[in-house]
Image (cartoon, rainbow, N blue to C red):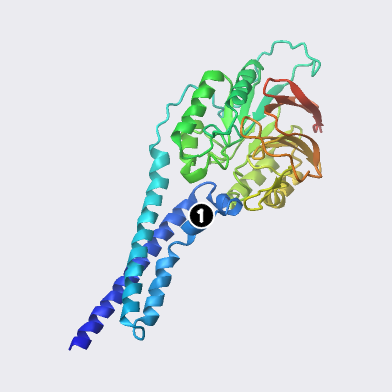
Amino acid sequence: MNHHNDMIAASRQLRITFATALIAGFLSLVFNLYHFSLQGTGGLYTWHPLPILTGMLFMGLVPLGIAILYFFVFRVGPVWLRTALHWLSLLISAMVSLVSVALLVYLIFVPRLGKLEIPQLSLINPEKGIEPIARIAESSAEETASPLLRLSFTSDPHWGAETSNAEARTSILKNIARHQTDAFFMLGDTVETGNVASMWQAALTDLGTHIPQVPLRVLLGNHDALFGGQYLYTRAFAPREIMDDSGSPFYWSLNLKAATIVAINLPWGTENFGNRQRRWLEKTLAAADSTKPIIVLSHSYFYASGYDDPANKSPWYDHYQNLAKVAPLLEQYKVTLVISGHNHYQELLFHNGVTYALVGSMGGIPDPKPAYVSPASQWIAVGQFGWLDVDLFKDRLHLVFRNENGVPQYIWDVQTRTN
């Protein structure tokens, strides 16, 4: 009789062990599925495979593994081992369940509940386009004729990072406000950690203070996307009243009189470049007016000089994903200029008819001197802050790389199609 009761109790223990392990595994799966549904998560795991990230990904397998081990010793193992495995499985299942729920709540609610006070900014609406301002004549040796349009670009200001240069960042904003630009594009990594509302608020406050009247559009960078940061990004820079032709706030196009501007969503690389975005990009490039220049914007770069990440050996140069999956489209449709950030340099590159500009120089800590120099590189500035002006003329794009004080550092003309 006692043996029978012991077997019933042991069977109950077995069921409880497996039930709690399955619940823990399920909660871990739900957390990971939600995490990977967010912008940038796939890239985070690809480019920064930290042990803690690996632990979060596979933690749900641990209680299941212990439960399976318990099953094998259930009938033949000593009582003390069965008891130890049972309680160990319950303990780890409880821990994994609590951690999974806590992380899920963190990802869902922290970015959504963060408070932002949105200043009056002149966000660019694709339906309305960009109108050139009446420019005061400049006495400059750079260019005498007035351009059809002047566009300014920079990237990687990293508000909220202790290592970022706030003085250089502010100087760039003040000089752009004085510089009679028709539109200003920030190409991502606006903040250091995407789900921290105070960092977005600092960025919004500075932008509202220094460039409230400058037409502005901001891309999503890999740091912006961290841990659900996309929700704060859209509240700050992609409100619902701005209608994008793609149906997504993360990639869009502007069909202007002087050029076609196409922004694509590559926070880390091609992890978010799925079939929907690829079809949209091909359709947009194919429909672009061949007599106007095509300017493509992205956060992560294509060709670039750089280095191997000392922590995990990730190659931060000539982007193997973007070059394999996206660059052929740029060459096929004869894109004129591609402008990106991500690496903290100013660099000009050229490959197969496409000019590439790197402008990750708005205040984020400068990257080290490149250990690898891209064969496509034409010019590079290391340890320098600033922005890029692109003046659009009928027959060319006039590129001027400037430092944070607006002083030209390098000038390059890109001939455009006139057929």
User: In front here: 74 or 301?
Assistant: 74
Disc 1 is placed on an element classified as: helix
User: In front here: 311 or 258?
Assistant: 311
Instruction: Count the labels in the image.
Output: 1
Give coordinates of residue 59: x percent, y percent.
Answer: 44, 61
Where residue 23 sits, quadrant-wise, is: bottom left
Residue drawn at x 54%, y 47% is 40
Callout 1, which amino acid?
Leu
Q: Is residue 256 visible?
A: no
Residue drawn at x 32%, y 69% is 87
Is 64 placed above or below 7 here? above
Circle 1 Cα neighbour tier, 10 Å, few/some/many (<14 / 14–19 / ≥20):
few
Give coordinates of residue 33: x percent, y percent.
Answer: 46, 56
The answer to whether residue 40 is left or right of residue 232 is right
Is 2 placed above or below 89 here? below
Is 230 placed above or below 212 here? below
Residue drawn at x 34%, y 72% is 18
Quadrant of the rendering where the N terminus is positioned: bottom left
Residue farthest to the left, as pictured? 1
Give coordinates of residue 378: x percent, y percent.
Answer: 81, 37
